Image (spheres, rainbow, N blue to C red):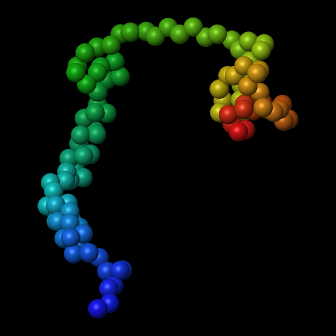
Amino acid sequence: MATDYDEVRSDVKESQDRSLEALQSANAPDARSVVSELDESDALDDAMTPGGEFVAEELIVQVIPQAADEFTCSSCFLVRHRSQLAREKDGHFYCKECEG
């Protein structure tokens, strides 16, 4: 008796049918409920969190200028030490990670 190896096995086919039936019977949200939820979240004030708490916190970040022995990679835009310099072309610097 010849065996057709391209035919789907019966246990796999049954599993696929059950998965499809489960997806079809699942309670998916309709488009209107999703839009209304998005509108509600957009209506929140910028200073309010979803829990209704006011956030009046100012972030202070110290910006350190690029040192003389550092460069900014033109590919990944990270500031690297000169020891990471792989090549320079037309005034653009590239790090070893981006070139490797």
Decide if residue 93 is in sight here: yes
Measuring from the top left, give residue 73's x and y in whole percent.
71, 29
What residue appears at the point 24 percent right and 46 percent down from the top-left corner?
A: 34
The C terminus - image quarter: top right
Decide if residue 17 is in sight here: no
What residue appears at the point 24 percent right and 52 percent down from the top-left corner?
A: 31
Measuring from the top left, give residue 84's x and y in whole percent.
73, 25
Look at the picture and state if 31 lies above or below 7. Answer: above
The N terminus - image quarter: bottom left
Look at the picture and state if 23 lies above or below 39. Answer: below
What residue appears at the point 26 percent right and 45 percent down from the top-left corner?
A: 35
Q: Residue 26: which quarter of the image? A: bottom left
Measuring from the top left, give residue 65's x and y in whole percent.
69, 11
Measuring from the top left, give residue 62's x and y in whole percent.
57, 8
Q: Residue 44: which quarter of the image? A: top left
Q: Residue 54: which quarter of the image? A: top left
